[in-house]
Image: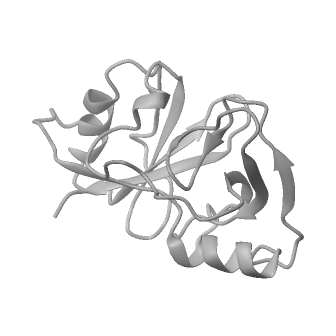
Amino acid sequence: MTTPSMVAFRVHALSAEVLDSVRASGVDAFGNRAERITAEGGEPLRCCLRNAEAGEGLLLFGYQPPLPASPYREVGAVLAHAEPCAGPAEADSYPPDWRGRPQVLRAYDDRGWIHDATTVHDGHDPEEAIAQLLAEPDVVQVHSRNIAWGCYMFAITRAG
């Protein structure tokens, strides 16, 4: 693996277009009904990249992260606010609520294929883990995924 230097990165929550479409239609891009649920508290929200507070209205729906057509393209369940929210507080730093949460950092090349740099990290010092992945010249994006469920959390790309 290439030795990383500090790499500026951008964190990508679910796009407003995807969220607006699911909220308006009540179905995801695959025609499956979005489920309305009430947060128990602590659920990871992919719209604003924070944990839900108990009582918040949520949508549970299938999401396919943007990748080129490839054998590694997946669909998985995600949670987002049922109503529009402000989105993430920052796009150039790791989501604060998710520090310390073990994650799979799945690296992808420009074909949408999983890169060998993919790793599991313990949630501590995610910037270092991200820098190591983005230091690999063939890595064009990284997906953070939940270890236990495999669910997509957010995408990471080099800044600029």
Confirm whether residue 69 shows in the render: no
Colour convention of the picture = one colour
Residue, far left: 5
Q: Percent x, y for residue 45?
A: 61, 46
Q: Reply above or below: 53 against 101.
A: below
Determine the image quadrant of residue 2. top left
Q: Residue at x 46, y 57 (%)?
A: 87
**For this view, does 87 lie left or right of residue 51?**
left
**For this view, does 11 lie left or right of residue 78?**
left
> Depth check: 85 or 62 in front?
85
Q: Residue at x 73, y 80 (%)?
A: 24
Confirm whether residue 43 shows in the render: yes
Q: Reply above or below: 34 against 104.
A: below
Q: Residue at x 48, y 29 (%)?
A: 97
**For this view, does 85 lie left or right of residue 28?**
left
Q: Percent x, y for residue 56?
A: 72, 44
**For this view, does 15 lie left or right of residue 32?**
left
> Depth check: 87 or 120 in front?
87
Q: Reply above or below: 4 against 12.
A: above
Q: Reply above or below: 35 against 23.
A: above
Q: Percent x, y for residue 66?
A: 53, 70
Q: Percent x, y for residue 99?
A: 43, 24
